[in-house]
Amino acid sequence: MDGVVHEDAFFAPGFYLLIASGKKLSHQARRVAAVIGLALTLAAIIAFLSLRLAKQFGRLSVPPLYDDVSYFVEAARWLSAVQINGIAANLGGLLHQHAPFSSLTAIIGLILVPGGYVGPYAINAVILLAFLLGIAHLTWRRPFVDIATCLVVAACVPVFWHTMTEARPDLPWGLALGLAIGSVLYRPFLQRSRWSVFGLGALCGLAAAIKPSAFPASLTCIELAAGAQLICECLEADGGGFRAAVRRAGLPPLIFVAGLLAGTFAIAGFELVNTLNYIRIAMVDYRDFWVFDESFRDSLLHYSVGVEGRTALSYWLWFGLALIVVRLGLALLHDRRDVGRSITLVVAVLVAYAIPTLSPVKSYFLGAMFYGVFIVAMALNLCAIIGGLEGILSRLTLGPAFATVAGFRTSHSASCRRALAVMCNINTSTGRSMPLRKCCSRRMSQSSPVRCRIICPGPGWATNSSAAWTLIPTCAWSIHCRCSPRG
C-alpha cells in the first residue's frame, strides 16, 4: 500500500516458483538447442564426407549391389503404383515388403533426389541424427559437456560411418537395437507405470521390426537384457526385501512382452510366413555359403578382433572395454550402488555379442546388433565414470570446506540453523522457510546427535560472519542434508 516492495514479497511461494521456473525453462531451452545443434552438425559432417568418399572409390562409384537394387526396385514399383491408385490404397503394400523400413527409406530418397541413386543413401543422415539424439536422451541427466563427448565418441566409430552408404536394414537395425537396450536399462521397471512399460516394449518391438528376418535374435536380446534389469532391481529393492520385489515384478514383464510382440508383429506380422521361410533358406539351405571355415577360437573372436569386428569398431573396441573395466572398478571401490547397474549393462553387451557369435552364419551385417549395443554401452559407461570421478574429487577437494556434524548439541543449533537459512535463501526475520530448514531445525533443537553434512565455519563464525556469508552461497548446491538421529 505504501508503494514499496517489501522483502517479504520476494519470499511468497508463487513469486519464488515463477522466477525459478523461468530460469529453469530458459536454461533447458538453451541446452536442448545446443544438443540438437551439435547432433545436426555431426550428422551433416558424416553424411557429407561419407557420400563424397563413396563417390570417389566407395559404394556410389559403382552401380548399386544386389541387395540395394532389390529395395530400389520395390521402391520404384511402389511409387509407380501410387501414381495410379493413390497413397492410401498402397500403404498396405508397403507392409508386405521383405524389409518395409528399407523400402520406405528408398521411397523417400527417390522422391527427394529422383535423378539418381544418391537419395536412398543420403536419407540415412536422418538415421544418424536419430541415433545421436537417442544417445543424448539416454545421457540427458549429465552436463552438456558430457553429452557432447558421448555424441562425438559415437560419431567416430567406423560402423556409424558405414551406415551412411548402406541401403540394407542391418546397420540401422543394429543402432536402433542399441537404443532399445539402452532404454530398457535407462529407468527401472518397477518405477514405471503400466502404460510406460507397454510403450517401452512397443518401441523396442518397432526397433526389432526394422530387420524382420532377425526378429528372433532381436527379441531374445531385448528380453534377456530386460530380465537382467528386473533381477537387478529386485536384488536392490529396499521396501519388503527381495521376495516382495519379486511379487511386485510379476506383472511388468508380462506387459513389456505384450508391448514387445505388438510392436514387432505390427510390422513383421504381415509377411511372417515368408520371413520364416527366408530364415530357413538362409540358415539351412544356404548355410554352407555363409559359414566361415574358421576354428572355434576365431569364431569366438569374429565380431571383436576378427575381420568383421576390426572393420566395424577398430580401436574403439579397446576403448569400450576399458570403460567397462574402469566403471566396474569405481563401483566396487567407491559406489556399491552402481555395481548392479554396471553388471546389468555388461550382461546386455555379452548377450548382444553371443547371439551372432553362436550363429553358424557369420556376416558383418549380422554383427550389427552387437555394434549398436556396444556404442550405447560406451556412452552410458563414460557418463557413469565421469560422474563417479566427480564424486571422488568433490570429496577430496571440498572436504576441508565441509564439516560433518556428528554430535551437535543445543549450543550449536542456532548457528547451524542460521547457516541452513543462508543456504536455502531463507528470510529468518519473517520466519519463512523451506522444508530443509524445518527438518534440520526440528532435529537440531533436540539434544540427540544428528547426521547433517553442512557448511559450518566453526564455533567462531559469528565473529567472522562476512567470510561465512560469502562461502555458504557458493557451495549451496553441493549441500546434502540427512537429518536422521543416531542416538
Image (tube, rainbow, N blue to C red):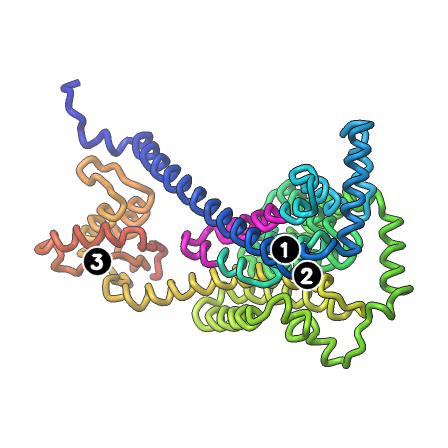
Residue found at the far top of this picture: 1
User: Which of 279/201 is in front?
Assistant: 279
Is residue 187 something that shows in the picture?
Answer: no
Horizontally, is 21 left or right of 112 in the view? left
Which mark, by number, is residue 55?
1
Whether pointer 2 and pointer 1 mark residues with C-beta atoms closer than 8 Å, the reply is no
Disc 1 crowd rating (10 Å Cα; few below 14, some 14-19, many 20+) is some
Dot 3 amino acid type: Cys
Q: Which part of the image, by quadrant, shows the N terminus?
A: top left
Residue 320 location (% of width, % of height): 55, 68
Q: Is residue 256 left or right of residue 12?
A: right
Query: Residue 484: x percent and y percent?
Result: 36, 56
Nearer the observer, 104 or 404: 104
Instruction: Name the N-terminal-most of marks 2 and 3.
Output: 2
Q: Which residues are magenta?
A: 124-149
Residue at the image position 41 percent from the left and 53 percent from the top = 143
> Is residue 142 inside the magenta stretch?
yes
Residue at 31 percent of width and 57 percent of height:
452
Residue type marked 2: Ala
Q: Amino acid at mark 1?
A: Lys
Say which element carries label 3: loop
Task: Between residue 40 and residue 335, name the one nearer to us.
Answer: 40
C-alpha span from label 2 to label 1: 24 Å
Instruction: Tell me the element at label 1.
Output: helix
Work out how far the residue at label 1 is from the one at label 3, CA to CA, in angstroms.
Answer: 66 Å
Give residue 456's mark: 3
